[in-house]
Amino acid sequence: MARIVGYAQAGVDPKIMGIGPVNSTPPFFFMTSWRYATCQRAAGGPAGGPSALLGAHLRYDSSMSDQRFDMLSSSESGLTYVREKRGGVMRVLTESELADFNDPPPCPQCAEQFGCEHFNCAGEPMLAEDEVESVAPPQWLAFAKACGISREDLDRLKLIEEHEGEYRVAPGADMRTQEIVLLLNER
């Protein structure tokens, strides 16, 4: 049995996915007079996941679970029987479907789960400013300083060509390369 003690909402820029809990948690704590420790006790331990009740003054506790499901069993055919931790709904998922459901772990430096400045969407660490200046090719230096790049992005930049004033990449490129092309074309 559960009891709703309060809730809060906050409007954020749609470009920043996943940041809603950061802005909505402080009003929730204010309205309910709860503290983070109270939420941990109510949940029977650490809050239900990295983004659950994550406020601007809270840090990510590495003991929190990053998995959305409890694994019940798996078959030799590649099917996995799981139960959602939040709703208790049971599902049968393939390995690729299961991987799609698992959210990335939050950044250990800032606790942001999506879109932090320390890691790109591929989960690769971004280079520091002084590293960018020393390793980025001159034609990409302005972009690298403005948007940030990882070591792996240096190889991806070699796959990008400019054609009639627009940047393009060969079909079959990974998602991060496609993201870089979108960022370049927005500039």
Image: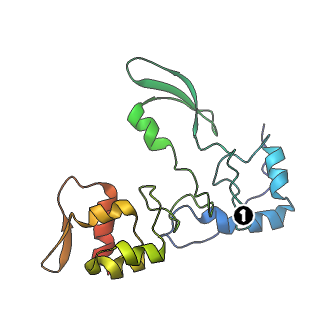
Q: Residue furthest top?
A: 76
Q: Quadrant of residue 68?
A: top right
Q: How many marks?
A: 1
The answer to whether one can see residue 79 in this image is yes
The quarter in which the C terminus is drawn is bottom left
Give the residue drawn at x 63%, y 33%.
Answer: 88
Element type at mark 1: helix
Compared to residue 17, the image places residue 67 above or below, namely above
Q: Nearer the viewer, residue 177 or 101?
A: 177
Q: Position of residue 134 (x, y in %)?
A: 38, 76
Give the residue number, with chain letter if any, for mark 1: 25
Residue drawn at the location 17% of the way across and 59% of the way down:
170
102 above or below 33? above
* Residue at (32% x, 67% y) in the render: 180
Q: Three-letter amino acid code at disc 1?
A: Thr
Image coords of residue 54 (percent x, y): 69, 59
Q: Relative to residue 170, is residue 94 drawn left or right? A: right
Residue drawn at point x = 28 percent, y = 69 percent:
181
Is residue 9 visible to us here?
A: no
